[in-house]
Image (tube, rainbow, N blue to C red):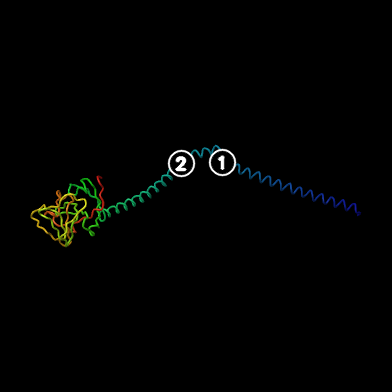
Amino acid sequence: MNNNELNVFEILKQTDSQTEKRKTGNKNEERDSESEFWKKSGQEQNAPDPFFQEALQQAIAPQAEELQKRKIKGTLAKALKKWKKAWIGEVAIIVAVFLFFAIFVVNISQVSGSSMTPNFYPGDRVLILRPGKWNIERGDVIVFKTEDGEKLMKRVVAQEGDTVDISSTKGGLYVNGKEVKEEGIYTTTSVTDREVTYPVTVEENCCFVLGDNRTESKDSRNREIGQIEKKDIIGKVIFNFRGV
């Protein structure tokens, strides 16, 4: 066999090999195309019909809206309940603090009568410091209860151990032998109850009180009032709300 014949066989062999590869490639392409076709066909079959999808949305829209409303209402109800609890707690604290101060610390009382003019007029409101009853000095204004339960407001002019004297002839207030000069007092201190004799020594845990309007005041100069025991003192006046 010559070289030309060998070359022909080799050429034929190569040609057959290339043909086989093309056939194989075509088959693969056909399979891929077929697979892609079925895949697309399956997707198209699984895809919802636009008309059906719209009808479904319209059908479930009311239920979805109702569920959304219930969810919002539930959230608002929880928030409102939580806010109510917090609000009630805050109000309770405020009321408790107010009651504590009103019972044990301060109190507001309205002035009636003219026995404390011109420093206190009828209708004025005064702020009373309850713990102040344990730290009273001469010149302080106090509020106390009488045996009849009446509340009175007077000024302290003497305390336990002090000697109080009032001149029966020319008037005037004397404490421990010295005449007392008081600012804001424009009437003369005189004897109002002839059955009370002077000088008077203030007893233990007591104080001697007078009204600022000495001619119109019923106070320690009268037997019905007498000396004021500290246990009957409600508190000390620390502020006057004029005309409130």
Instruction: Tell me: 212 left or right of 74.
Output: left
Q: Which residue is mark 2?
A: 65
**Rendered location of residue 121, percent (x, y):** 21, 46
Q: How many marks?
A: 2
Q: Which residue is mark 1?
A: 48
**Rendered location of residue 44, percent (x, y):** 61, 42
- Farthest residue toward the right? 2
Note whether 15 is above or below 138 in the view shown.
above
Asked if the residue under mark 1 is in contact with the one under mark 2, i.e. CB atoms within 8 Å, the reply is: no
Name the one closer to the observer, 59 or 201: 201
Q: Which quadrant holds residue 105? A: bottom left
Question: Earlier along the polypeptide chain: callout 2 or callout 1?
Answer: 1
Q: Residues within 10 Å of mark 2 (few under 14, many from 20)?
A: few
Measured in 3D between alpha carbons, the distance from the residue under mark 2 to the one under mark 1, in whole angstroms, is 23 Å
Name the one closer to the observer, 107 or 244: 244
Instruction: Tell me: 114 left or right of 88.
Output: left
For marks 2 and 1, give the one nearer the viewer: 2
Identify the residue shown where x is 48% and y is 40%: 61
- The quadrant of the rendering that contains the N terminus is bottom right
The type of residue carrying mark 1 is Pro
Identify the residue shown where x is 31% and y is 52%: 94
- The quadrant of the rendering that contains the C terminus is top left
Q: Secondary structure at mark 2?
A: helix
- Farthest residue toward the left? 195
Q: Which quadrant holds residue 50? A: top right
Name the one closer to the observer, 206 or 68: 206
Point out which mark residue 184 bears.
Answer: none
The type of residue carrying mark 2 is Glu
Q: Residues within 10 Å of mark 1 (few under 14, many from 20)?
A: few
Instruction: Tell me: 162 left or right of 53.
Output: left
